[in-house]
Image (spheres, helix red, strand yellow):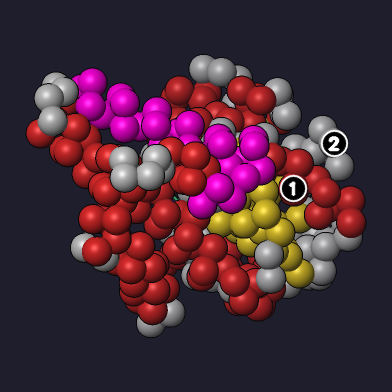
């Protein structure tokens, strides 16, 4: 499937970020990507790089093998219904990044035995640092490997069962907001103890970056790393315990569960 032509239907924030990332990584040449939206003037930044931009979804699908659907959930059915005659199982795979539209629903719309994937990235896809959870229906091994490789260009990829897609949305996509709020709060604390806002924000953000890298690159458990910085009777454990007394871990866990309950409604 290497060198497949890719159509991105719905070139908004996510669709355009996927195109940018795939070009930057060298996974595909700009000429092998076609991206669509009604207001194609908004795709000028991709057009100047050599990407095909059009508002003709039918043409985009006919000229491509991999169809990435990045429409809003409320118009995916209407748009795909109008295009269903153009899908061909011997030529196409469909990858939907649309939140909340199931493989079953997508299969019912697209039909023709076309292999369907769902992928849930987060906004860090814009800088190729997403975690993208993927599940599929009816795909062959080479197609599964191709889709994994595609999203690996944009961060890391985790294969999941579809029943975990809502959980993936909360932990990975909403998770960006939780992490940013942590950085914002740490910054506010940093200002109170003497830093200007810009410096406090830089220190807080890079500290979170370093902490994450310790886990990802060092393959460590968080508590193992926490133990290294908590000197007996020291300031770290005193601050950490105060945060816990005030419900730090508990509020995070409850927030994750609240988001999950909301998404399921
Ligand atoms: N942003 C994220 O971090 C994120 C993460 C995970 C999943 N998602 C999911 O990804 C999807 C897209 O999100 P987004 O933030 O990128 O939304 P968005 O910026 O609104 O992008 C959707 C695009 O679809 C285009 N569109 C509408 N009708 C169309 C049609 N008939 N043909 C072709 N294009 C059409 C719109 O452009 P025109 O109005 O110009 O046509 C718009 O730019 C959503 O389902 C969202 O739930 C987003």
For the point 64% across and 61% down, which residue is it?
A: 118
Is label 2's Cβ within 8 Å of ligand 1? no
Vertical placement of 47 versus 256: above or below? above
For the point 45% across and 63% down, which residue is it?
A: 170
* Viewport quadrant of the C terminus: bottom left
Lower position in the chain sequence, tag 2 or tag 1: 2
* Viewport quadrant of the N terminus: top right
x then y, percent, for residue 42? 39, 32
Is label 1's Cβ within 8 Å of ligand 1? no
Q: According to the image, label 1 marks what residue?
A: 148
**Residue 220 horizontal side relative to residue 234, left or right:** right
Secondary structure of the residue carrying tag 1 is helix
For the point 88% across and 60% down, which residue is it?
A: 140
Residue 205 visible? The answer is yes
x then y, percent, for residue 232? 38, 44
| Prevailing SS of the magenta stretch | helix
Secondary structure of the residue carrying tag 2 is loop
The magenta segment: 198-224
Marker disc for residue 165 = none
Marker disc for residue 2 = 2
């Amino acid at each position: 499937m290497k060198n497949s032509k890719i159509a991105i239907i719905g070139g908004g924030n996510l669709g355009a970020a996927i195109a940018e990332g795939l070009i930057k990584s060298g996974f595909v040449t700009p000429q092998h990507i076609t991206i669509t939206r009604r207001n194609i003037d908004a795709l000028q930044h991709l057009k100047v790089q050599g990407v095909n931009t059009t508002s003709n979804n039918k043409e985009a699908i006919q000229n491509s093998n991999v169809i990435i659907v990045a429409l809003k959930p409320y118009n995916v059915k209407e748009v795909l219904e109008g295009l269903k005659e153009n899908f061909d199982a011997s030529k196409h795979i469909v990858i939907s990044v649309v939140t909340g539209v199931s493989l079953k629903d997508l299969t019912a719309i697209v039909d023709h035995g076309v292999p369907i994937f769902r992928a849930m990235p987060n906004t860090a896809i814009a800088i190729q640092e997403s975690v993208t959870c993927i599940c599929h229906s009816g795909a062959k091994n080479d197609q599964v490997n191709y889709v994994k490789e595609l999203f690996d260009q944009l961060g890391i990829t985790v294969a999941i069962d579809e029943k975990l897609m809502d959980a993936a949305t909360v932990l990975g996509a909403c998770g960006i907001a939780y992490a940013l709020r942590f950085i914002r709060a740490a910054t506010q604390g940093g200002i109170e103890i003497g830093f200007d806002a810009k410096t406090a924000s830089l220190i807080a953000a890079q500290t979170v970056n370093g902490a994450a890298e310790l886990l990802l690159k060092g393959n460590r458990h968080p508590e193992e790393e926490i133990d290294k910085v908590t000197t007996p009777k020291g300031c770290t454990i005193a601050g950490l315990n105060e945060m816990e007394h005030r419900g730090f871990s508990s509020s995070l866990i409850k927030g994750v569960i609240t988001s999950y309950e909301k998404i399921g409604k």
